[in-house]
Amino acid sequence: MRYLAVPDQYRGQGLGRRLMEEAEKLARARGYIGLWLDTFEFQARPFYEKLGFELFGELEGGQGAIPRYFLKKRF
């Protein structure tokens, strides 16, 4: 999977969690040892952390730049 985004009107209904569970299921079926993803400060870092992802890298923001976070989850 390349990108995952849940439109505002569908948030809070468990759709994002179900999509991530399906991505994890597919990854396990393919023999992967984990997943990694990146998100920006204004997006869903706490959401991914609730799903068991942990921070492993960060590009700090600055003037005109938004911080970007890299998270991973090993199986």
Image (cartoon, grey):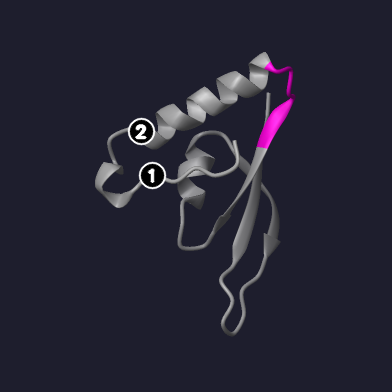
User: Relative to 66, is 74 above or below?
Assistant: above
In the rendered structure, the answer to whether residue 57 lies left or right of residue 26 reads right
Residue 50: image location, x then y, percent: 48, 38
User: Relative to 25, is 20 above or below?
Assistant: below
Kind of residue at badge 1:
Val
Kindly identify the residue that appears in the image at 29 percent across and 41 percent down: 12
Measured Cα–Cα span from mark 2 to mark 1:
8 Å
Quarter of the picture holding the C terminus = top right
The image shows a total of numbered marks equal to: 2
- Please give the residue where the numbered disc 2 appears in the rendered image: 15
Prevailing secondary structure class for the magenta stretch in the rendered image: loop
Assess whether residue 66 is covered by the magenta stretch.
no
Quarter residue 64 falls in: bottom right
User: Relative to 2, is 61 above or below?
Assistant: below
Kind of residue at badge 2:
Leu
At label 1, counting other C-alpha atoms closer than 10 Å, the crowd grade (few under 14, some 14-19, many 20 or more) is few
Kindly identify the residue that appears in the image at 62 percent across and 56 percent down: 69
- Please give the residue where the numbered disc 1 appears in the rendered image: 6
Q: Which residues are magenta?
A: 30-35
Residue 29: image location, x then y, percent: 65, 14
Residue 3: image location, x then y, percent: 54, 44
Q: Secondary structure at mark 1?
A: loop
| Disc number placed over residue 21 in the picture, else none | none
Q: Secondary structure at mark 2?
A: helix
